[in-house]
Amino acid sequence: MSNKKTFFEPIIHNNPITIQILGICSALAVTTQLKPSLVMGIAVTVIIALSNLVISLIRSFIPKKIRIIVEMTIIATMVILVDLILRAYLFDVSKQLSVFVGLIITNCIVLGRLEGFALINKPIPSILDGFGNGIGYSLILVAVGATREIFGAGTLLGYSVIPQSLYNVGYVNNGLMVLAPGAFFLLGLIVWLQRSITGHYEEE
Amino acid sequence: MRHNNLYTFIFITIVTIICAGLLSSAAYLLKEKQQTNVEVDMKKNILKAVKLLENGKMSQQEILDSYNNNIESYVVNNLGIIIELPEGISVADIDPEKEDTKPEKERLYPIYVKRTGAEISAYCVPIIGKGLWSTMYGYLALEPDLNTILGITFYKQGETPGLGSEVESEGFQNKFIGKEIWDKDNNLVSINILKLEPASDSPSIKHEIAGISGATKTGEGVMNLLLKDLLKYENYFRKIRMRNVQEEVVTDVE
């Protein structure tokens, strides 16, 4: 598989969320607003890319029996490292991220890419695969986060986007959007939309 | 490639040692910077509660300078008596959460006051308590009458993102400004958080604000922690309020 394909495949045709249905838990939890969705997307992208690189570099030395333990150790190290750096240099962002860090360690996409790609591929394609999957994940998060914030709270990144005149004629924010089921519906719609465009079918 | 048990053991040991080494050195190297951040963040939030952080954009140095120039701190006990701290311990070292585990008589409660010239222009106390998922940390600032709320901040919480986490938002915090914590019979009633906007003809509208929709439990938490923490200072506040009243009477006579 060419490097270009490795990078672009997970963004559209093999998106981790809409096709592989991985990382749903965090996609539901952090997407009430755009900002945490963005921050989460960036953090996950960096962590997948770095863990992929490390695992790919040591792939021929890892004993098969304990590979999951090794992978989890690497992921946890990366997550804590990212958290420490954020707390020292981007304190405000880290305050917002704090509760989500645990979610990154348990994010199925990270472990999934290590198992499915980095263990059997060279470092450069592994980094690309990591970035591709991270960006694919971030795109969906940002789409869901933006939609939920606009319709749930009438704001985007904290700024009002729905004009007051609309509220005056009786428009109300959709309370469903700020709750988890709202994210479920949106994700379902995105999965449906994407699969009807790309023609993807689950194997029987 | 098959590996024997010894190889497996050595491999995982090396991986663990490298990871642990990496993390502990990162934690060690970044510790000072993180502690400064936490300290600045605490001071920034006190400044924010007493409205000294108007534009919200101040460098770390400006925050520290403004804090040193305007804020004084001391501790009181549950009877409302100001306590001298032993040497080497500053008010910032008093952890309100740890104080709560001590016997009531030994507890120390920090107070931050803003001075404008010789006059005290605001009192600020830490507020800490449980919300739905997490412990929320903040500061409450009162006007010199120790009744009207000047400002409130929450700077650390792990409530539901987008719902309970809105306690950190300006919109919610601004609702507290101008509300009163004592009723007309001089009882400490704190603030009630309702599900809806308080009716404009409600007799207790001075003590009521609307909560955050979708975060009723977080609102209840805020309500409980405010009352709990204000009661700690009740005796001290009563004393000062009494003194204020007497001074007013004296000035009237003159």
Image (spheres, coloured by chain):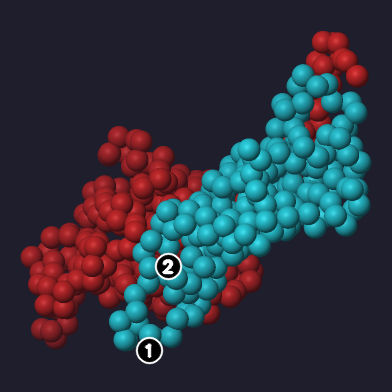
The circle drawn on residue A165 is 1
The circle drawn on residue A152 is 2
Mark 2 or 1 closer to N-term? 2
Chain that bears disc 2: A
* Chain A on-screen colour: cyan
* Amino acid type at image mark 2: Gly
Residue at point 28%, 75% (across, down): B178
Image check: B159 left or right of B200?
right
* Chain B on-screen colour: red
Q: Position of residue A196 (x, y in %)?
A: 62, 59
Residue at point 23%, 71% (across, down): B197
Quarter of the figure that contains the C terminus of chain B: bottom left
In the rendered image, which quarter is residue A198 located in? bottom right
Q: Where is residue B165 in the image (x, y as percent from the top left)?
A: 44, 58
* Amino acid type at image mark 1: Ser
Q: Where is residue A98 in the image (x, y as percent from the top left)?
A: 57, 50
Label 2 to label 1: alpha-carbon separation: 17 Å
Q: Where is residue B219 in the image (x, y as percent from the top left)?
A: 31, 57
Image check: B253 left or right of B94?
left
Above or below: residue B69 compared with residue A186: below
